[in-house]
Structure formats: structure tokens, C-alpha cells
Image (tube, rainbow, N blue to C red):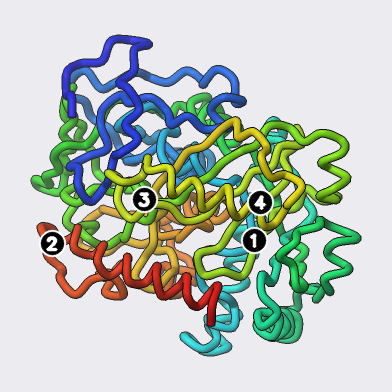
């Protein structure tokens, strides 16, 4: 990729085939993906321009998405530390500008019943208390930046097949009886009459916590607030070399080296192998597609009976996530290509369009105004990590949300800020804080960085198995 100095206000073309397993870094000064969020967020806030000379910083945060900006914001607010944020491309370029904007009371891909099975009831209860605290952190930031168009009300978890209702009933019972949530099981008729006429509905679980947001407007709020507190945000400054000498970290960028006493990585699904040894091959990047329709007409709103703006997901392993946006457009997302090279293939967008038509036959043929894809950071055990992988080094990371990072990234940033500042907390004994990322062997039996792309063979097999289990068995 081009490493020449970008001219002010001139951005490299968006690369739709970028793949973190194939490229050494995500580029330099690359423009945004063509998302609905970018088109509707308005002019991006000011930043501090690329790094142009060697410089010193107390703390460097790598990545300017939700996690990176939240970390910098909380470092300044709660610890008096003014961080320097390094971003390879435009500010808020990666996961944060491409997700579905669904904020849920979750922090990974595992359900609460799975927490109990994996770690026991006592740890699961403590983890739930931490995740609830995380959702409160997210809500407080959403309230601080109301321009993000919040759509509260809860989360509707729809059974796409009748046999999935048993799973939802069990999960609702666990959430209610063990964790004290006001969960409700809804019949098909109740979903259709009170929420939405999704033709694939066989019932649903409704949980009270859930907020849809305009993710880029929210992140722009983080960015403005952080810079007001003295945080420096440098776009077009990819980290192309990392060395620690005498306890000082040297982060090489094309414009100069930044020296820092501590570093926090917040690179999500755009974490390239070679960025830092603690992150090599520790995340499996998975592509997710998304589209946004034109605004629905009154007749289409009546036909789909979209009475809710709540966030919605279905029970597929390769799930659809969708909602009605404030301007009456439908946003829907799901799985995509295995590789970046194949991402523009129209067959992947056809999966989304067909899903939209199955769920809402009245929308068959509706114009699609926006479509895009982006990389999701999936960890070895489907749960995030906010940790210091080596206690001898002042290097930290927060990533591995598995598609549930919109809300929990706020609290992950807060917790990573605490760790960077040298604070302790009982919560750090929890699995998501007390252990490091491991190799994602569910996809891969080879651990070498050179063999990382071969994980895609396992992913291809799993996708076929998931499809059969979701749709056939």
C-alpha cells in the first residue's frame, strides 16, 4: 500500500478487498467505506493530522474506533492522562463506522447460560454484574451525545424456526431466575401485533436492555470530547514498526516515531499480524455485510407493521441483525465473504437481500441505497479480552467483541484506561480481564503467522455446517 505522505484533505481510495490476514496494515489515509453512517453523519470533526516527526507521548492508543476513543476519553477524564491516538486511515475508519449500531447488554457471542456452563454460577453472576455496569457506561455516553439518534426500548431476539423456541424459553428462564432480568417470551401473534411482521417469526425473547444508535455520530461525539480534554488524534499514521528499548515503546509510523511509556491496542477486526507479538494470529477476522434500504412508504410500513425501532436479531448462528432506522429505512446485516478478495462478489449481498425479502415479502424489489462490509473481531472463546498480556510490559489491548462491541466497547475503554493508569479492581479477576487471547483453534490448527490465511479452510467448513444447522436440520 502507498506510504507516501498524504496531502491534507486528500484520501486514498477505499479498498473494498482489504483483508487483515493478507495485508501488513490497513493502509494509510484511506477514505471511509461507503456506509449509510458516513453519508448521514455530517462533516467529520477536526483531528490533529498525521504524525510528521519523532515525538514523545505518555500513552499511545492504537486505533480510533469506539474502544480507542473511549480509552482516551476516560484516561483524560478519570486519570488526568492525555493520550495520543494513532489511526492508520481516517478517524473512526474501521469497525465503528461499519457496524449495525446495535447496543445490547452483552460483551461477546456467548449467552448467559453458556457463562454458567463454562465458568460456574458464581463467576457468571460477577460477569453479569460487570456487563450490566458496562451497559450503564454505554447509556451514559449515549445520553451525553444525543446527536447519535438513540432508539431505546430493548432487544427482540426472534426465533427463525419453531425448534428455536425451546432455546429461547430456556435462556429467558436463566436470565429471569438466575440474573433477575425482566425477560418475556412472545408468541408469533404478539411479535406481529406489537413489534413487527417478520414472516420468519416463530416467537421471540424480549429483553429490556437494548439501544440502537447512529454509531458514527456517537463516535464523532467521543472524538470531539476527547480532543477538548487534550487528547491528540493522528490519522494517516499506521504503526509499521514496534520496538521496546529500556522500557520505552517506540512506535514507528511513516511520518515519524512516537515514544511512549504505555501502549493500548484497540484495533478490533482490523488487527494486522505483525502489529505486536501479543496479537499475532490471536483474532479471527470475520466479514459482515450490511445494507440500508430507501425510506419505507406508509403502505410499506403498514405491510411490515414496523411498530418498533428496537434492535432485532434472529436465532441463526450466522444471524441476521436488523432494525428500522429513525428515517424509516431498514438496516439489515449478516455474514459475508470468507476473504477480502471475494468480498465484492454480488452473491454475498444477495444473501442479505434474500433474507430481507424472506422476512418482509412486501419489501421485495425495494431499492437498496447503501451496502458495505467490514471485519468483525472474533476471539478463541467468543468473549472479549481487556488485559495486559505480559505483566512485565506496559502493553494492553481491548478487542474480541465478536460483533457485540457497540455498547461494551465503551466500558472496555474505561477498564483499559484504568489498567493503563495502574489502577486495580476486583473485576480484573474475571475471565475477560484476567486472561489473554489465545490462538483461535476452532478455525486453525496451525499457529504460525505465515499460515494464518489457511484458517479460512476451517471457516469455510464451519459456515457450511452452520447453514445446514440453521436452515435444514
Residue depicted at x 36% and y 62%: 387
Q: Measured from the top left, where is residue 135 in percent x and y?
A: 64, 57
- Disc 3 to disc 1, C-alpha distance: 21 Å
Classify 68 as above or below 44.
below
Q: Is mark 4 on a helix, strand or loop?
A: helix
In primary-sequence order, the first of circles 1 and 4 is 1
Q: Measured from the top left, where is residue 77 in percent x and y?
A: 53, 39
In primary-sequence order, the first of circles 2 and 4 is 4
- Disc 1 to disc 2, C-alpha distance: 34 Å
Q: Check disc 4 and report the residue beneath it.
A: 357
In primary-sequence order, the first of circles 2 and 3 is 3
In primary-sequence order, the first of circles 3 and 1 is 3
Instruction: Count residues near mark 4 (Cα–Cα under 10 Å), then give few for <14, some for 14-19, many for 20+.
Output: some
Pick the front one: 146 or 338: 338
Q: Measured from the top left, where is residue 345 in percent x and y?
A: 37, 43
Q: Check disc 2 and report the residue beneath it.
A: 451
Q: In this view, does 27 lie to the left or right of 269?
A: left
- Disc 4 to disc 3, C-alpha distance: 29 Å
Q: Is mark 1 on a helix, strand or loop?
A: strand
Residue depicted at x 52% and y 33%: 35
Residue 268 in sight here: yes
- Disc 2 to disc 4, C-alpha distance: 39 Å
Q: Measured from the top left, where is residue 3 in percent x and y?
A: 17, 24
Q: Nearer the viewer, mark 2 or mark 4?
A: 4
Q: In this view, does 282 lie to the left or right of 298?
A: left
Figure quadrant of the N terminus: top left
Res. 269 mark: 3
Q: Check disc 1 and report the residue beneath it.
A: 313
Q: Which of marks 1 and 4 is in front?
A: 4
Instruction: Count residues near mark 2 (Cα–Cα under 10 Å), then give few for <14, some for 14-19, many for 20+.
Output: few
**Extreme-top residue of the structure:** 8
Amino acid at each position: 500500500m502507498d506510504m507516501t505522505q498524504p496531502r491534507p484533505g486528500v484520501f486514498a481510495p477505499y479498498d473494498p478487498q482489504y483483508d487483515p490476514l493478507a495485508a501488513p496494515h490497513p493502509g494509510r489515509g484511506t477514505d471511509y467505506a461507503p456506509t449509510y453512517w458516513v453519508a448521514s453523519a455530517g462533516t467529520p470533526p477536526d483531528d490533529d493530522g498525521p504524525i510528521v516527526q519523532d515525538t514523545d507521548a505518555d500513552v499511545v492508543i492504537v486505533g480510533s474506533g469506539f474502544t480507542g476513543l473511549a480509552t482516551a476519553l476516560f484516561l483524560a477524564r478519570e486519570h488526568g492522562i492525555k493520550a495520543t491516538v494513532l489511526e492508520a486511515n481516517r478517524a473512526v475508519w474501521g469497525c465503528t463506522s461499519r457496524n449495525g449500531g446495535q447496543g445490547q447488554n452483552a460483551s461477546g457471542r456467548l449467552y448467559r447460560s453458556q457463562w454458567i456452563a463454562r465458568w460456574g454460577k458464581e463467576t457468571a453472576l460477577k460477569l453479569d454484574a460487570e456487563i450490566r455496569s458496562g451497559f450503564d457506561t454505554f447509556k451514559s455516553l449515549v445520553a451525553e451525545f444525543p446527536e447519535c439518534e438513540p432508539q431505546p426500548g430493548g432487544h427482540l431476539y426472534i426465533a427463525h424456526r419453531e425448534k428455536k423456541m425451546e432455546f429461547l424459553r430456556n435462556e429467558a428462564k436463566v436470565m429471569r431466575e438466575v440474573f433477575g432480568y425482566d425477560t418475556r417470551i412472545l408468541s408469533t401473534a404478539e411479535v406481529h401485533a406489537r413489534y413487527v411482521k417478520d414472516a420468519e417469526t416463530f416467537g421471540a425473547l424480549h429483553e429490556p436492555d437494548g439501544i440502537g444508535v447512529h454509531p458514527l455520530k456517537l463516535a464523532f461525539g467521543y472524538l470531539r470530547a476527547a480532543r477538548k480534554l487534550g487528547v491528540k488524534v493522528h490519522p494517516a499514521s499506521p504503526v509499521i514498526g514496534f520496538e521496546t528499548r529500556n522500557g520505552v515503546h517506540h512506535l514507528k509510523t511513516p511520518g515519524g516515531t512516537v515514544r511512549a511509556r504505555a501502549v493500548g491496542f484497540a484495533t478490533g477486526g482490523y488487527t494486522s499480524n505483525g502489529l505486536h507479538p501479543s496479537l499475532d494470529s490471536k483474532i479471527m477476522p470475520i466479514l459482515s455485510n450490511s445494507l440500508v434500504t430507501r425510506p419505507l412508504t406508509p403502505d410499506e410500513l403498514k405491510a411490515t407493521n414496523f411498530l418498533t425501532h428496537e434492535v432485532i436479531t434472529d436465532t441463526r448462528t450466522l444471524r441476521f441483525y436488523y432494525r428500522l432506522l429513525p428515517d424509516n429505512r431498514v438496516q439489515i446485516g449478516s455474514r459475508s465473504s470468507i476473504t477480502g478478495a471475494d468480498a465484492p462478489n454480488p452473491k454475498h449481498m444477495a444473501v442479505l437481500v434474500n433474507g430481507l425479502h424472506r422476512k418482509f415479502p412486501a419489501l421485495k424489489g425495494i431499492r437498496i441505497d447503501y451496502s458495505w462490509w467490514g471485519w468483525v473481531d472474533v476471539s478463541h472463546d467468543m468473549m472479549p479480552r481487556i488485559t495486559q498480556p505480559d505483566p512485565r510490559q506496559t502493553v494492553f489491548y481491548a478487542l474480541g467483541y465478536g460483533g457485540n462491541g457497540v455498547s461494551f466497547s465503551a466500558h472496555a475503554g474505561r477498564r483499559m484506561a484504568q489498567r493503563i493508569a495502574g489502577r486495580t479492581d476486583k473485576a480484573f479477576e474475571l475471565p475477560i480481564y484476567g486472561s489473554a487471547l489465545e490462538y483461535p483453534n476452532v478455525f486453525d490448527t496451525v499457529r504460525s503467522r505465515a499460515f494464518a490465511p489457511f484458517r479460512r479452510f476451517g471457516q469455510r467448513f464451519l459456515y457450511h455446517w452452520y447453514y445446514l444447522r440453521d436452515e435444514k436440520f
